[in-house]
Image (tube, rainbow, N blue to C red):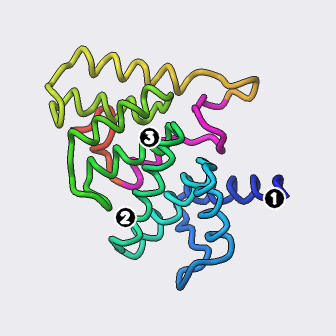
C-alpha cells in the first residue's frame, strides 16, 4: 500500500542521487509511471517531483528534448502548485543551463529564489552564484554572500536527531549541490570560476 509507494519513491530518489539513470520502462510508460502521473494529477507533489526526476534522467541520458520538457512540466507543477523546494531548485538549474527550456538566467534566478525561500540549500547556493557573477540579476556580492550563508545554514540544520540536512520536502535527504555539480559541472555552485 502506501508504505510500498513511499519505498518506491525513496528508491527512485536514491537512484537519482547516486547517478543511476532511472528508467522504469525506456520503451514506453510503465504502470508505475502511469500511477505516478495520476498521483501528480491528484496534487501529490512528491509524485510530480519524482516524475520530473525520472524524465530528466531519461532525457539527459538519451539526449531527448521531449523527456526534458516533460521533466520541466512536472517540476514546474511541483514547484509552482506544490511549493516543493527541490523542484524549484531543479527548474532554476534547467533555466540556467537551457535543459528542456530555453536558457533564461532571469527565470533561473526567479525559480532559484523561490527554492531558496522554501528551504533548498542548493537553490540558495546557485542563486548566490548568479548574484556573484551578475548573471540574470544585478551583480551584488553582499547578496551573494548572504545567500551562501543561508545555504550553509540550511544544509547544516539537523532534522530531528538523525543529523541529516534539513529540506522542505518529504523525500530522502538530498545533497543538492553534489547532484547539480555532477549533472551540470562545477560552474553551478560556490567557488566556481
Q: Is residue 155 above or below residue 10?
A: above
Quadrant in the picture for residue 106: top left
* Count of numbered circles in the view: 3
Q: Nearer the viewer, mark 3 or mark 1?
A: 1
Residue 173 is covered by the magenta coloring: yes
Q: Earlier in the sequence, mark 3 or mark 1?
A: 1
The residue where tag 3 is placed is: 177
Tell me the CA gap for discs 3 and 2: 22 Å
Q: Is residue 102 above or below residue 26?
A: above
Q: Secondary structure at mark 2?
A: helix
Task: Check disc 1: other Cα within 10 Å, few if <14, some if 14-19, many if 20+.
Answer: few
Q: Earlier in the sequence, mark 3 or mark 2?
A: 2
Q: Residue at x 43, y 41 (%)?
A: 88
Q: Nearer the viewer, mark 3 or mark 2?
A: 2
The residue where tag 1 is placed is: 4
The magenta region covers 164-183
Residue 45 position within the rendered picture, expressed as x and y whole percent measured from the top left: 59, 47
The residue where tag 2 is placed is: 69
Residue 131 position within the rendered picture, expressed as x and y whole percent measured from the top left: 22, 27
Tell me the CA gap for discs 2 and 1: 29 Å
Quadrant for the C terminus in the image: top left
Quadrant for the N terminus in the image: bottom right
| Residue 70 numbered tag | none
Residue 162 is covered by the magenta coloring: no
Tell me the CA gap for discs 3 and 1: 29 Å
Q: Nearer the viewer, mark 2 or mark 1?
A: 2
Do labels 3 and 1 touch, CB within 8 Å? Answer: no
Q: Residue at x 46, y 51 (%)?
A: 75
Q: Residue at x 61, y 60 (%)?
A: 15
Residue 84 position within the rendered picture, expressed as x and y whole percent measured from the top left: 52, 39
Task: Check disc 2: other Cα within 10 Å, few if <14, some if 14-19, many if 20+.
Answer: some
Amino acid at each position: 500500500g502506501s508504505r510500498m509507494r513511499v519505498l518506491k519513491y525513496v528508491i527512485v530518489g536514491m537512484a537519482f542521487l547516486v547517478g543511476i539513470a532511472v528508467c522504469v520502462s525506456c520503451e514506453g510508460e510503465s504502470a508505475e509511471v502511469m500511477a505516478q502521473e495520476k498521483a501528480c494529477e491528484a496534487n501529490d507533489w512528491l509524485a510530480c517531483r519524482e516524475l520530473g526526476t525520472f524524465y530528466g534522467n531519461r532525457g539527459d541520458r538519451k539526449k531527448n528534448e521531449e523527456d526534458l520538457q516533460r521533466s520541466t512540466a512536472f517540476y514546474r507543477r511541483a514547484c509552482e502548485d506544490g511549493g516543493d523546494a527541490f523542484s524549484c531548485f531543479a527548474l532554476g538549474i534547467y533555466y540556467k543551463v537551457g535543459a528542456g527550456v530555453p536558457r533564461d538566467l532571469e527565470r533561473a534566478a526567479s525559480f532559484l529564489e523561490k527554492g531558496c525561500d522554501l528551504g533548498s540549500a542548493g537553490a540558495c547556493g546557485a542563486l548566490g552564484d548568479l548574484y556573484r557573477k551578475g548573471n540574470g540579476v544585478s551583480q551584488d556580492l553582499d547578496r551573494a554572500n548572504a545567500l551562501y550563508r543561508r545555504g550553509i545554514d540550511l544544509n547544516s540544520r539537523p532534522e530531528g536527531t538523525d543529523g541529516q540536512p534539513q529540506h522542505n520536502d518529504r523525500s530522502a535527504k538530498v545533497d543538492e549541490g553534489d547532484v547539480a555539480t555532477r549533472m551540470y559541472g562545477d560552474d553551478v555552485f560556490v567557488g566556481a570560476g
